[in-house]
Amino acid sequence: MEISQNVVEYYDELYPVTNDQKSFYADEMSAFPKPHRLLRVGCGTGSFEHMLAKEGADVTGLETSHELIESANRKRRTQLMSLRFFQMNTLEMARFLGKGFYHIISILDGRIILIHDETLIKKFFFDCKQLLAEKGRLIIGLPNFIKFSSVPMAKLPDRQSIRCSLYTQVWADPNDKRTIQLDLETSNGKVSTVMRDVPVFALTVPKIQELAEGTGFTHCDFYGGFDRQPFTEQSDYVIAVIS
């Protein structure tokens, strides 16, 4: 993800690790023997990955942003944890990572829509299937584009902290080609652009099911959030667990 330097300072505030997320992953990991082996695609500043590693998991984080990877590595307090971060995109992961190794692969916070080409998203699903251990799970978190499908512009839910707000808009042209714009407003009223005119693919629940079935997965569960509320067309978010 090409990301402006000005959002790195606020990243952990805007994308916090919630108690619901911790409980959700604890439940998912309980299906596998320890040490749990996790891969996070689009790990940001790596806060969740550090927490999992401190609890004994073997964790790998991938991120395309050099600034975010640097922030993730600065959090490391000891070299004894099974934790590593790589600056790597989704096209490279199947080439460099171990096949059949991971219990859980995650791509959260809508990062999957930045794989803006449907063929490349299909490749991502296929590569995840190759990287997962037997009965491994792919977890995807993204906005519900069944609800947020307005043309020409859909406004996604804001992310806010005491110090700033992050505003997200997805624009669609007459050919249904979509781009995303993110703007950061700090508490002093200054507004700066994080992303603008970046192509995205508005992935929906039916398309996730289609891609999962077409790449060898056999089961999909969908929730409206990490609290495991049932997914509906009016849910703001989708959490998909694919196995």
Image: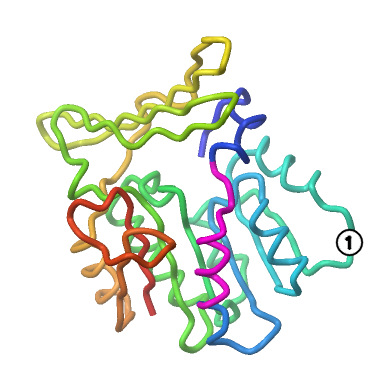
Q: How many residues crowd mark 1 within 10 Å: few (<14), some (14–19), many (20+)?
A: few
The residue under the point 33% across, 80% down is 217
In terms of depth relative to the viewer, which is nearer, 8 or 91?
A: 8
The residue sitting at the top extreme is: 189
Q: Which amino acid does label 1 sit on?
A: Gln
**Residue 168: which quarter of the image?**
top left
Q: Is residue 102 left or right of residue 70?
A: left
- The span picked out in magenta is 15-27
Quarter of the image where one finds residue 10: top right
Residue 73 place in picture, x, y as percent: 77, 48
Q: Quadrant of residue 81?
A: bottom right
Asked whether 178 or 53 is in front, the reply is 53
Q: In this view, does 71 lie above or below 142?
A: above
Query: Which residue position holds label 1?
Result: 79
- Residue at left offset 64%, top offset 76%: 37
Measured as percent of width and height from the top left, residue 189 is found at 52, 10
> Which quarter of the rendered picture does the C terminus lie within?
bottom left
Label the magenta part by its dominant secondary structure: helix
Q: Is residue 37 left or right of residue 117?
A: right
Q: In the depicted view, which residue is nearer to us: 129 or 107?
A: 107
Q: Which residue is drawn at 58% across and 10% down?
A: 188
Residue 19 within the magenta-colored segment of the rendering: yes
Look at the picture and state if 161 lies above or below 183: below
In the image, is residue 20 part of the stretch drawn in magenta? yes
Tag 1 secondary structure:
loop
